[in-house]
């Protein structure tokens, strides 16, 4: 049916909180010689695994067990990583379909579905994705590279929504804040970081508005210190980049926080 030949196994991420359905999808995919990179149950884990593995395609349930639903996760996956996502959902009401459409999925499959439904939708989505990425105007988001590299960087990285809530934190960020990433999802960044102006010796009352959003406009923000859990202060540099969707609308911010060494202060 499709004219391509698989030179390497197509990598698929399954995001489904029903263990039985998830297992059945995996079984079907393996029978069709796809590679399952991971099976996760939450939108926040989906974001992390996409950054870690960069799968070829994502199969996404909408109602998930975690703090981020499938539609929200898809909005950031498609905007940052340019990876096609297929929704798998029993919900087909108008409100859900409208929300889902705004996340720009590759397809939407109503549960229950057959293996044939899944296969045909996956292959069509992959075919369209290859055509898109061959077009002369296509380019990957710079934040895609940053998000992938952040997993091993010795700087703290955060993805925030437009309200300053944490959607993603890298391992070094977890270390600096002494938190588990799953515990901070959807919390405001200001709950964990308090910044001080080292020139004025004053506290920034709103971490997101006064520091992060301002760095979007004014560029790299220096002359800042952050209070650590042990009560000490560390000088930091804040750099922020807008995350934009296909319509060029800002949907969030990627934030890098560099902890200065003594020779940098």
Image: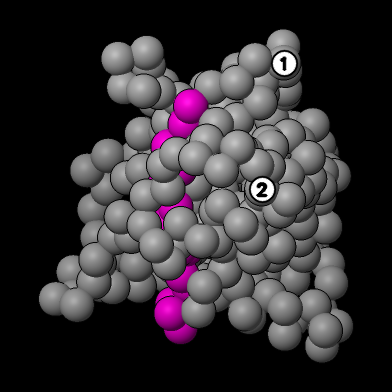
**Which residue is found at the position 46% from the left and 83% from the top?**
247
Is residue 66 depicted above or below 176 in this figure? below
Q: Which residue is mark 1?
A: 231
For mark 1, give the secondary structure.
Answer: loop
**Where residue 104 appears, x then y in whole percent?**
54, 75
Is residue 43 depicted above or below 225 in this figure? below
**Which residue is found at the position 36% from the left and 23% from the top?**
265
Q: Indicate left or right for 255 with 24 as reference.
A: left
Is residue 122 depicted above or below 256 in this figure? below
- What's the distance in space between the residues labelled 2 and 1, CA to CA? 17 Å
For mark 2, give the secondary structure.
Answer: loop
Q: Indicate left or right for 9 with 183 as reference.
A: left
Is residue 164 depicted above or below 151 in this figure? below
Q: Indicate left or right for 113 with 146 as reference.
A: right
Q: Earlier in the sequence, mark 2 or mark 1?
A: 2
**Which residue is found at the position 49% from the left and 46% from the top?**
255
Please indicate, yes or no, whether residue 257 appears anywhere in the rendered image. no
- Furthest residue to the left? 136
**Where residue 3 appears, x then y in whole percent?**
25, 66
Q: Which residues are magenta?
A: 235-248
- Furthest residue to the front? 200
Task: Using the rendered view, name the quadrant where residue 108 is placed.
Answer: bottom right
Is 241 magenta? The answer is: yes
The front one of 143 and 104 is 143
Q: Which residue is mark 2?
A: 204
How packed mark 1 is, by other alpha carbons closer than 10 Å (few <14, some 14-19, many 20 or more), is few
The front one of 183 and 203 is 203
- Furthest residue to the bottom? 94
């Amino acid at each position: 049916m499709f004219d391509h030949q698989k030179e390497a196994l197509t990598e698929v991420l399954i995001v489904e909180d029903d263990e039985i359905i998830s297992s059945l999808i995996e079984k079907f995919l393996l029978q069709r010689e796809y590679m399952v990179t991971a099976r996760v149950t939450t939108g926040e884990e989906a974001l992390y695994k996409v950054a870690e593995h960069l799968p070829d395609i994502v199969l996404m349930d909408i109602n998930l067990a975690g703090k981020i639903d499938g539609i929200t996760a898809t909005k950031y996956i498609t905007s940052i990583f340019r990876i096609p996502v297929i929704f798998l959902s029993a919900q087909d009401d108008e409100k859900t379909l409208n929300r889902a459409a705004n996340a720009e999925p590759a397809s939407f499959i109503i549960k229950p579905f057959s293996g044939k439904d899944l296969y045909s939708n996956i292959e069509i989505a992959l075919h369209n994705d290859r055509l898109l990425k061959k077009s002369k105007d296509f380019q990957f988001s710079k934040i895609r590279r940053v998000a992938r590299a952040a997993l091993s960087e010795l700087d703290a990285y955060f993805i925030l929504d437009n309200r300053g809530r944490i959607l993603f934190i890298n391992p070094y960020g977890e270390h600096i804040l002494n938190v588990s990433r799953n515990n901070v999802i959807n919390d405001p960044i200001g709950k964990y970081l308090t910044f001080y102006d080292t020139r004025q010796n004053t506290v920034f009352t709103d971490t997101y508005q006064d520091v992060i959003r301002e760095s979007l406009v004014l560029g790299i923000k220096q002359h800042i210190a952050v209070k650590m859990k042990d009560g000490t202060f560390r000088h930091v540099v804040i750099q922020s980049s807008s995350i934009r969707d296909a319509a060029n609308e800002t949907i969030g911010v990627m934030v890098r926080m560099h902890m200065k060494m003594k020779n940098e202060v």
